[in-house]
Amino acid sequence: MHEYFERFEQRASKRSTLRIVRNIIKPDVKEVRANELTKNSPWPQPSPMNPFELPSCVVHVPEKEIEHFIKKVVRRYVKTIQTHSFKSLTKGGSHKLARKLNDKEFCDYIFRTCFSKILSKNISPDEHRIFFDVIEDKKEYFTYNLMPLKTMKTYPDMYTEGTISLFEKKGDQLFPCAIYIKQQVVTPDEHDRWELAKLYVMQGASIILTACIHPRIHFPVDSINGITKTLIPKEHILFQLLSPHMYIQLPLNFAVQYISKSIAHGDQSEIYTPYPCGRKGFFEQVALGYRGVEGNFRYPKYSYPLSVERFETDYSIFLEKYWLCIYRFVKKIVEFIDCDSDLIRLWANSIAQYVPGFPNAQQMLKKDVLAKALTSYIHNCSVSHAVDHYTYSRIPLEHSPLRIRIPFPSPQNSTFKLDLKDVVTREDYIRHKFANLMFFKENNLTLLADVNYAFKQPELKKLVREFHADLKQTEKEMPTENYIPLSEIAASIQY
Ligand SMILES: [Fe+2]
């Protein structure tokens, strides 16, 4: 029974003379305005902002979670602003706000961070036409398509461009060959144009990753979180398994989407709003990430994954190793859950209505489907989320400006000279720095490495100990570079 009804039952069964008198003199009608049941049932609903193009969301975030979020996260935001503002705003200007990035640095950022999620070995017919003069037979290429930025409306005097980059892969390295920008194919021998084109790609990758690709991790899973909390009793093994991975996600995601002080709303009177666009531009990118971009296979429509999401670089291998580790644990826990109970059937069918691709009750009966669905939730909210933040926040801001103030020159402008001092203003840089400290950089509250579950049974407790050991082993045996240390992976979406 919902705790609201339990509390009501307890109160209603006790006769109180004082309450009788009070109810006669001044009947309380407060409950009609704010029903506790609605306030504390985080059932999802179609997005009030854009029901057709954004994921369903949870608007009724339980009050306790909001209070906790204010205490643990909002206070940190306030402290960061208060601690760093004076120094940032009064410090002189010898520091470079945009720096030239050499081709190796450029390739490393695209190939060895979360930016690599949209690198592709496939070259579309259009891209073939664009790079016809550059592409040579028997060479291996990657393309990097940031065309969804083409439609972004920016604030005055700020620019973004839809770009496509072509890289050649030799051994374990990428080498940049050309960048398609403003209907021109720019190559490394075009010096200043090439330097500016690379900064445009870095800007585009930063916006696309943070506003279009990463939100696929944040928002669609709110329905799983909300429905699990509403339907499943706290003593149920399924609730106990997901609970540590649902921590603080709902108030955080609600704040990002609906609080006017959110970084995504772009209020220019806040010091930490770094994007070249406002709320509309930001959520258009979120919508593109969710509904997909027609005719561009790098941006597929969102569908809940029952395995690790595949990308064409080592980033995918890293993600997969942890997915399999979590799966080994979850599979054994799921043996203690009756997949065909009325409760699990209702739970699965409810989520399937709100999350595209989430298996319904019928599909849950197939072997391992519940285990895979739960694994994906845990992996999504821990490893997958944390590694994006960790790798992105370590890219120097001087190499990845979110705002660019110089329009890319037309082909007629043959005397174009790049002055790096004009690329980014001091204010742009400060905004970006605050956003990095407050939102992009990891700020861990609970960690995956020592995650604890409220299981009572000794067999389940033993499985948790084995899981902790397996996580350590997975990190030790990682065949690729460790994109994030295990000790920095948060247990849930908490920043
Ligand atoms: Fe995030």
Image (spheres, helix red, strand yellow):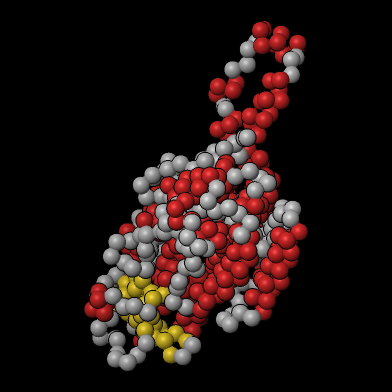
Where 226 sits versus 447, above or below? above
Work out whether residue 134 can be spotted. yes
| Quarter residue 88 falls in | bottom right
Give the camera-side residue of 216 and 461. Answer: 461
Give the camera-side residue of 103 and 446. Answer: 446
Quadrant containing the C terminus is bottom right
Residue 139 is left or right of residue 393, and the answer is: left
Residue 426 spot, x, y in % from top left = 53, 62
Quadrant containing the N terminus is top right
Residue at screen point 31% across, 75% down: 180
Work out whether residue 274 can be spotted. no
Residue at screen point 66% across, 63% down: 448
| Quarter residue 489 falls in | bottom right
Give the camera-side residue of 321 and 107. Answer: 321
Residue 194 spot, x, y in % from top left = 38, 79
Residue 298 is left or right of residue 29, and the answer is: left
| Quarter residue 464 falls in | bottom right
Residue 356 is left or right of residue 327, and the answer is: left
